[in-house]
Image (cartoon, rainbow, N blue to C red):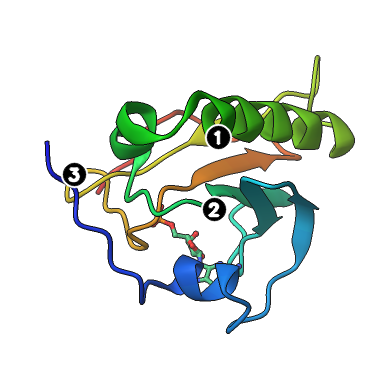
Amino acid sequence: MAYTYDPQNIFARILRGEIPNKTVAETAHTLVFHDINPHAPVHVLAIPKGPYVNFDHFAAEASVEEIVDFHRTVASVIADLGLAGEAGYRAITNAGMSGMQEVPHYHLHILGGRVLGRLVGPA
Ligand code: 5GP
């Protein structure tokens, strides 16, 4: 599969410091920040710093170091935000047309702080 990355997408611009963000955590390979339009009391987005358009691109082409860093950082944020264990959370990623992905830079939504309802609602 050949992936085309648009370097002008909004998260690429956030990574370049062209657009501000409310950072929750940052490492060499990963940035976690608050979603501008939260759908739950906690709604953060975790993105790799590398140019990956979606989950399958990241999983196929990122280095082991990037993949481990991303997931360990997300786990640490989940703990820091009080979502680990009983409280719980939902981690979602949207891809392409069916997933209605808006921003073509891989991101994982982490939502929590209330009961989130069923996984899939009406389109
Ligand atoms: P998608 O539909 O691509 O899975 O989700 C994109 C998410 O990015 C949406 O939840 C939207 O609110 C968020 N978003 C879009 N533009 C910005 C922005 O400039 N800053 C932040 N923090 N979030 C954004």
Q: Residues within 10 Å of mark 2 (few under 14, many from 20)?
A: many
Q: Tell which of 66 and 97 is nearer to you.
A: 66
Instruction: Name the amino acid type tagged 1.
Output: Glu
Q: How crowded is mark 3: few (under 14 residues within 10 Å), some or many (20 or more)?
A: few
From the viewer's perspective, is the residue at label 2 or at label 3 nearer? 2
Residue 72 at x, y = what percent?
Answer: 70, 26
In which quadrant of the rendered view does residue 89 lie?
A: top right
Disc 1 designates what residue?
66
Residue 116 at x, y = what percent?
Answer: 59, 35
Element marked by disc 1? helix
Element marked by disc 2? loop
Residue drawn at x 24%, y 49% is 123
Q: Tell which of 36 and 58 is nearer to you.
A: 58
Disc 3 designates what residue?
98
Q: How many labels does the image show?
A: 3
Residue drawn at x 28%, y 67% is 6
Residue drawn at x 27%, y 59% is 5
Q: Earlier in the sequence, mark 3 or mark 1?
A: 1
Q: Is mark 1 within 8 Å of ligand 1?
A: no
Q: Which mark is residue 88?
A: none
Residue drawn at x 68%, y 51% is 32
